[in-house]
Amino acid sequence: MLGRMLKGVSGRSAGKTIAVLFALILILSSLAVAGCAKKGGEPARKDTLIIALGTNISTPDNHYATGLPAIGANSEIGDVLFRLDANGNPIPWLAKSYEWSADKKTLTLTIRDNVKMQDGKTMTSEDVRYSLDRFVKYSIGKAALSMVTEIKAPDATHVTLTMKAPFDPLVRTLAYTTITIYSKASIDGKSKEEIASKNSPIAGPGPYKLVEFDPGDKMVLDAFPNYWAGKPQFKRVIFRMMPEMSSRIMALESGDVDLIDAISPQEADRLAKNSKLQVLNPPAAGIVRVYLNTQKGPLADKKVRQALYYAIDRESIVKNIFLGKAEVAHSFAPSGTFGYTGDYDVYKYDPEKAKQMLKDAGVTNLKFTVLHSPGRYILSQEVLEAMKADFAKIGVDMTIQNMEWGAFSAAIKLPLKDTKMEATLNWWRSVNGDADNAIADYASKYWPPGNNTPFFKNDQYDKLFDQEQSEVDTAKRGAELKEMQKILMDEVPAWVLYRQPNLWAARSDLQGVEISALSCLQPLYKASLKK
Amino acid sequence: MLRFLFQRLVVTIPTLLVVTFMVFMIVHLIPGDPAQILAGDFATPQVVKELRAEWGLDRPLLVQYGSYLKNLAQGNLGTSIASRRPVTAEIADRYHTTLSLAFWGTLFAVALGLTAGVVAARKPFTAWDYGSMTVALVGISTPVFWTGLILILIFSVKLGWLPAGGTGSSLKYLILPAVSIGFFDAGVVARQSRSSLMEVLGQDYVRTARAKGLPEKRVINKHAMKNAIIPVITIIGMQFGRMLGGAVLTESVFSLPGLGRFLIIAISQRDYPVVQGVCLVLALSFVIINLFVDLTYGFLDPRIRQ
């Protein structure tokens, strides 16, 4: 038809155009077919697990990586000393046991024997010492181990970590995925650029070894058959970086990929109806909250903060915006962490009570602005819109000021004299399964530019914080953490809202995939397709 | 011709210097601290301070700019703050993806747009014309990301013929992105070529050619198209340049590791060396494309050459 059409237009010259077009199509098709041919030595599709992540993997080196899903992907190469079980308790992993000194200032780790690494070496205590030392000195996340002052490898199987003061959650902290153990020989003396390059030499004791790293595109890993915990089932794992959720979902539906992360509750519901797919929603360690400026502005009055907390219908947010896939948060620490208590959440939705409390406080025509960076946290704009409507019911006017993430980050880090922040929606978590890690930042010494965003100051809290941080008695520390959460729930430096969903989707026959509460994939050696 | 080429290349240098200065100042003046962004929510002020010192961000702005120019003169675009890889290597890894996308997208746009434009111009105010221009209008009006998603839905999810995204050794990975990005430009090319050819076909010299009894094919190819194509080539050149820098939506939808997506991520992370490097490379690409377009004019119209 096109031929006839063009012939009518310009005779034989149009025929030539068509010939050129057809030639082009033929070239394209032949190249496409040629590209379909599998390269020799490449595992079959059924032996390859393809995972699409919404996060960019900027380097395969976890000591310099950012973004928790990317850190999870990299942890297939290296491995950790401890892992956390579903209740946040440490499970010995590369460290087979540990022992505290009497003053609880020195932790001695006993390293697992005969752990092979991807560069052919056998893991020694020196590899562990070197990796920990490198993390403490250079890593972006080094604050997690800032209390450690000395790391030694006294013999081939032991590593000691010494601190100035006791820090009870240290063992749990060593389970933080980014504290990864690598082969010293593979990275020592090599530049950061070389380790982050396409032909990165990085090697570790993990289940999959690095084959190819294409920044912004993919990371290809091959099974390491000598993995100490068991032979990996898939011969190859490919991480593809796909920032668009809709693209990830369609890639999963078309069978291009097998597992995807970060999907919305609405899409999760739709995908769950597809018999070829499954939706995973493991517990999440992150809590979304609205921080409130406790020192100046319209929310500096504790009674106002409390009153407005009663006006937020958190159950409705979870039910209607997250379709029941999130969970109402009842404390500043995630449930399931050591020391958690949800006993002090008295703020059940009650707009009448909120109105009365505002009246008692003599507050009228209350207006405030909440800073927000859209797209950073799933459905956060919808959550703020729902809150705005809730507040409008009691005559309070909340303005949502959307900002680009970079500008937002700068705005919430300004010191008190400069800040204009009245409220801001953000997220916080516990990286080590301990409530301490989730609530420590409310100590007044961490005011911005530190992470005490609401400029919270409470003498009793500060005192308890100092006690808890150096407490050697674990049970006593648990009690102190609960007392600290009680103060926070009473003072309301933030409206804690909900635990974010941790939604993934996969082909229905994929099994053995474990995902941590921080959205990090755990070692994938057990992952396989059902027969 | 050589003199013309030399003059154009000399003018390029101050253009690029202005680009480096403007981009440098703009990215540094927008709020946001790369150290804070990259260090993330977990970072302490001490870590942020150390990172700023490591990357030289604690120095005065003009000192930083001077240092950047000095490195640039040695062919060094710096090191990415986010990945810690040389910016040159980062750009090289992605440039071919964007270039391939722009090339195949332009090829598709020209093939479809020119065909539709010629058909419409030859049969004005007929069903052929209205049909072609409707296709062109749909192309211009449809958002690129929407076209991309629909193409994925049909050809990947439903039919399973082509991959939904990503890259590979085969051109099949580029077919859907190229069609997606090229569809918009096809509309622009179609409308431009129609109006341009219609105008030329109404000129006296075309009437004379026909009156002399020349075959219609010869009238179109030899006489009309040569003049009608000049504004179309300008459009194609501009669209090609736009695709190089603005293919971010297509690259995002199809998960292609190209320059556009890379630039957006770099801006959000305030990865200054990457933003500066990519903008410089894109500006240079634009200059080269414009030069190429100007040379093509000369090739098609000897009067311009003189």
Image (cartoon, rainbow, N blue to C red):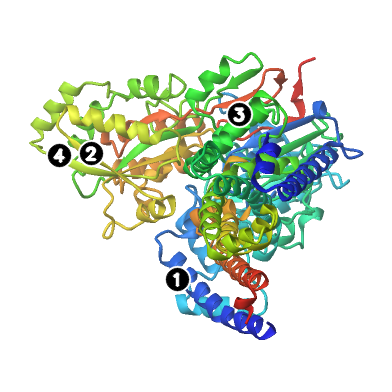
Q: Are marks 3 and 4 on the same chain?
A: no
Which of the two labelled residues, at mark 3 and mark 1, occupies the earlier sequence position?
A: 1
Three-letter amino acid code at the position of disc 3: Leu
Q: Where does the N terminus of chain A fall, quadrant-wise?
A: top right
Badge nearest the viewer, 2 or 4:
2
Nearest the eye: A359 or A460: A359
The residue identified by callout 2 is A398
Q: What's the chain of the residue with tag 2? A: A
Look at discs 3 and 1 and give the one toward the viewer: 3
Q: Which residue is mark 4?
A: A366
Q: Which residue is mark 1?
A: B25
Q: Nearer the viewer, mark 1 or mark 2?
A: 1
Label 3, residues with CA under 10 Å away: few <14, some 14-19, many ≥20: some
CA separation, marks 3 and 1? 42 Å
Q: Chain of mark 1?
A: B
**Which residue is painted at 23% across and 27% down in the image?**
A311
Q: CA distance from mark 2 to mark 3?
A: 40 Å
Left or right: residue A197 compared with residue A309:
right
A129 to A334, vertically: above or below: below
Q: For the residue labelled by badge 3, is the local secondary structure a helix, a strand or a loop?
A: helix
Residue B115 in the image: state x and y as whole percent: 63, 47
Relative image position of residue B163 (x, y in whole percent): 70, 34
The answer for how far apart the CA atoms under marks 1 and 2 are is 35 Å
Do marks 1 and 2 both belong to one polypeptide chain? no
